[in-house]
Image (cartoon, rainbow, N blue to C red):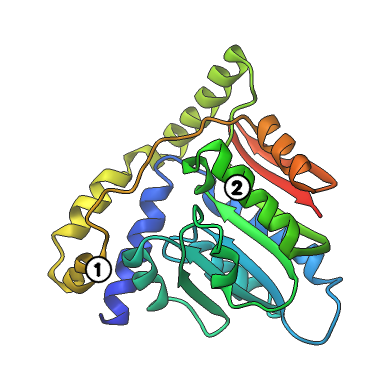
């Protein structure tokens, strides 16, 4: 696959993601700012190791590496097609690996021997059922160094019926104000992708069975509770717009 093809589809991916995440770039920037505070105190002379969970085509991974020169990013995702787009569209300090977060051996897929400085995720972990998510959080607590952070940027409701409705309305109203609701949506992107002959090899490698897209619907408070139960000493949101949060957990 040509790099220009990958770049075109990743740019189109980023645009369709804004259909439901109007402040996606600012949310990315907050994640980078949090990781940057940890990288600045990283021990040793080598690059800081950051793991991106559910990285898709590497949108966040690429931005982390571009913004933080001391960072080496390993992105994990179960979709070979998205990874194929990302591999052709990321730099040398980003390595993308196929891995299923439901498989307990997923941390070994990173190929990182030592403790990690940070782990991040963006709009990915709400697809995991609560038991699988709790296991992922425990694995993160085991692999992150003391003082390391996990940063999760995702839609997480406040946790009461009235506030959940208000928060969702706030986000949707924002998409209307900035016009991102007019962007191609997720389903339209995938349909168009399947019609691109240049991507036939990657489409052929994709699993025949559809990926389960049932949301766990955990609130931001429930995520924080799971993280503390997994071994993180602190967990709380540091940024919010409507029901869109950046949640930080400190090991």
Mark 1–mark 2 Cα distance, whole angstroms, equals 29 Å
| Circle 1 crowding by C-alpha within 10 Å: few under 14, some 14–19, many from 20 | few
Vertical relation: 214 (above or below) 199: above
Q: Going by the image, does 182 lie left or right of 204? A: right
Quarter of the picture holding the N terminus: bottom left
Q: Going by the image, does 165 lie left or right of 78? A: right
Name the residue: 43% across, 60% down: 56
Q: Going by the image, does 184 lie left or right of 152? A: left
Name the residue: 66% across, 37% down: 223
Q: Position of residue 34 (x, y in %)?
A: 74, 57
Q: Earlier in the sequence, mark 1 or mark 2?
A: 2
Q: In the figure, residue 73 lies in which quadrant? A: bottom right
Name the residue carrying label 2.
Answer: 153
Name the residue: 69% across, 51% down: 138
Instruction: Find out whether the residues at labels 1 and 2 contact each other: C-beta distance under 8 Å.
Output: no
Vertical relation: 62 (above or below) 188: below
């Amino acid at each position: 696959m040509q790099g220009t093809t990958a770049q075109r589809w990743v740019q189109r991916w980023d645009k369709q993601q804004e259909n439901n995440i109007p402040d996606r770039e600012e949310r990315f920037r907050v994640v980078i700012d949090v990781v940057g505070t940890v990288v600045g105190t990283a021990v040793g002379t080598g690059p800081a190791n950051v793991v991106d969970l559910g990285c898709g085509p590497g949108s966040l991974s690429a931005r982390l590496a571009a913004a933080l020169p001391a960072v080496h990013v390993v992105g994990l995702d179960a979709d070979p097609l998205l990874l194929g787009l990302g591999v052709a569209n990321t730099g040398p300090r980003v390595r993308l690996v196929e891995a299923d977060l439901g498989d307990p051996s997923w941390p070994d897929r990173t190929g990182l021997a030592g403790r990690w400085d940070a782990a991040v995720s963006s709009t990915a972990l709400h697809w995991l059922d609560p038991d699988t998510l709790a296991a992922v959080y425990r694995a993160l607590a085991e692999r992150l160094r003391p003082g390391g952070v996990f940063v999760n940027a995702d839609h997480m409701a406040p946790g009461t019926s009235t506030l959940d409705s208000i928060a969702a309305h706030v986000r949707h109203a924002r998409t209307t104000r900035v016009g991102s609701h007019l962007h191609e949506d997720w389903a339209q992107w995938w349909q168009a992708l399947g019609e691109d002959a240049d991507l036939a090899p990657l489409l052929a490698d994709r699993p025949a069975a559809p990926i389960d897209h049932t949301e766990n619907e955990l609130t931001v408070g429930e995520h924080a509770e799971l993280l503390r139960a997994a071994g993180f000493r602190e967990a709380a949101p540091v940024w919010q717009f409507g029901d869109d949060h950046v949640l930080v957990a400190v090991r």
